[in-house]
Amino acid sequence: VIDVTDLDQLTELCLKKSPKGLIMNVKSPTGWDGWAFGAQLQNTFCIPVFFITGAAAPPVNKAFSFPVLNKPFTRVQLKDHLGHWFEVRGH
């Protein structure tokens, strides 16, 4: 688990670490658009992106390609969602 808030740092880490997937918050303290950056990372590095959000509902045109878990959630819910996510993706 790596906690970053800087997009350049996240891109650099993806290049170095080759993660199997990313769990991203839709909104960041610095205000970047998680949907757009998630799509960029998914396309650039061919890695799955999973979002968590406190928003009532993601915009339909942006959320269609990403699994989303709404806050608040329990550890069991997170584990179940991630297990299903990796199962579907064949990891």
Image (spheres, helix red, strand yellow):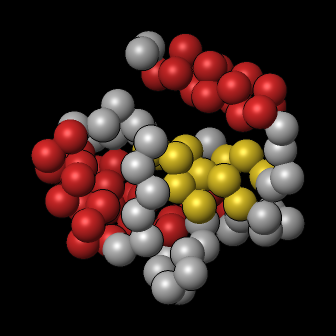
* Quarter of the image where the C terminus is located: top left
Q: Position of residue 42 (x, y in %)?
A: 34, 49
> Residue drawn at (85%, 66%), measured in percent from left and top?
56
Q: In the current view of this chain or complex, which residue is farthest to the bottom?
A: 31
> Residue drawn at (67%, 48%), measured in percent from left and top?
68
Does residue 43 sit above or below 6 in this rendering?
above
The answer, for residue 27, to whether it is visible in the render is yes
| Residue 74 picture quarter | top right
The answer, for residue 64, to whether it is visible in the render is no
Does residue 17 sit above or below 52 in this rendering?
above
Q: Is 6 left, or right, of 81 in this rendering? A: left
Does residue 57 sit above or below 82 in this rendering?
below
Q: Is 24 left, or right, of 58 in this rendering? A: left
Q: Which of 9/88 is in front?
A: 9
Q: In the current view of this chain or complex, which residue is farthest to the front?
A: 2
Q: Position of residue 10 (x, y in %)?
A: 30, 61
Q: Position of residue 83 (x, y in %)?
A: 62, 20
